Image (cartoon, grey):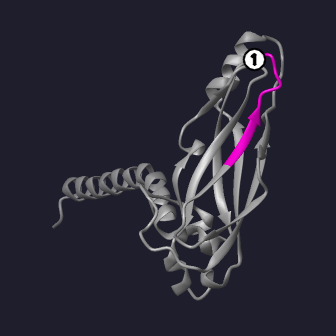
């Protein structure tokens, strides 16, 4: 005959193990998803690189630049709307941000490329989006992004046919910056 206490302890142990595994997977999901997107270019996620490849092809691609803000008072725009680069060649583009308010604001940028199939081939060497940006009241800055389109894109049946890639950034105010503004102006309601 099976001892009910031992059976209950085994069941409890198995359920506790499953719960611990699920909790661990929940914590691992965000970094795993980030890694997956960077490796595969999923959802237009771009890659990071130390330098451009040694190979530069004669084939070109047009890169368009897009900018927006989300619940943030900055004025944010690309300095140039588009440029043509050879595959493997390093491109350098600038975005301009202006803080028209009377307080310092810290923001961070999310980004992607479209069409999504080109994400795995679009690599940034240096970018303002890698760190938070703080603009003082009335300050205007130009922020660079150095990038290249991997020549391996020509081997991709879908992405290799794309004539135009759009690099998009959306700046939003950090939670800390927003909290400091709310603390400085009690009684105001912010979005």
Q: Nearer the viewer, residue 16 or 190?
A: 190
Q: With respect to residue 170, does 119 lie above or below?
A: below
Instruction: Relative to 139, say whether 173 is above or below.
Output: below
Which residue is pictured at 72% across the width and 47% down the height? 170
Q: Give above or below for 22 relative to 1.
A: above
Range of magenta residues: 94-103
Residue ID for mark 1: 103
Q: How many marks?
A: 1
Q: Residue furthest front?
A: 58
Residue at 49%, 62% (x, y): give it.
38
Q: Find residue 72 and report its horizontal and vertical position in percent.
A: 78, 34
Q: Nearer the viewer, residue 25 or 141?
A: 141
Q: Is residue 177 left or right of residue 72?
A: left
Image point 24% across, 52% down: which residue?
9
Q: Is residue 33 visible?
A: yes
* Residue 144 to residue 17: above or below: above
- Is residue 134 shown left or right of residue 72? left
The quadrant where residue 8 appears? bottom left
**Residue 44 falls inside the magenta stretch:** no
Q: Position of residue 66 (x, y in %)?
A: 76, 55
In terms of depth relative to the viewer, which is nearer, 84 or 95?
Answer: 84
Secondary structure beneath dot 1 equals loop
Q: Position of residue 98 (x, y in %)?
A: 78, 31
Instruction: Look at the image and tell me in which quarter the C terminus lies.
Output: top right
In the picture, the quarter occupied by the N terminus is bottom left
């Amino acid at each position: 005959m099976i001892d009910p206490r031992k059976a209950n302890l085994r069941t409890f142990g198995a359920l506790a193990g499953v719960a611990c595994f699920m909790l661990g997977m929940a914590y691992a999901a965000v970094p795993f998803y980030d890694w997956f997107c960077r490796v595969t270019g999923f959802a237009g996620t771009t890659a990071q690189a130390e330098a451009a490849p040694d190979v530069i092809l004669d084939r070109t691609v047009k890169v368009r630049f897009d900018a927006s803000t989300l619940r943030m008072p900055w004025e944010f725009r690309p300095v140039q709307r588009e440029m043509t680069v050879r595959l493997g060649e390093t491109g350098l583009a600038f975005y301009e941000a202006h803080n028209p308010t009377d307080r310092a604001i810290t923001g961070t940028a999310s980004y992607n490329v479209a069409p999504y199939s080109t994400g795995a081939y679009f690599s940034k060497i240096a970018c303002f989006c890698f760190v938070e940006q703080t603009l003082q009241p009335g300050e205007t800055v130009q922020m660079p992004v150095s990038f290249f389109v991997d020549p391996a894109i020509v081997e991709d049946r879908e992405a290799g046919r794309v004539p135009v890639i759009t690099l998009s950034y959306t700046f939003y105010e950090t939670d800390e910056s927003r909290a400091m503004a709310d603390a400085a102006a009690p009684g105001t309601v912010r979005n």
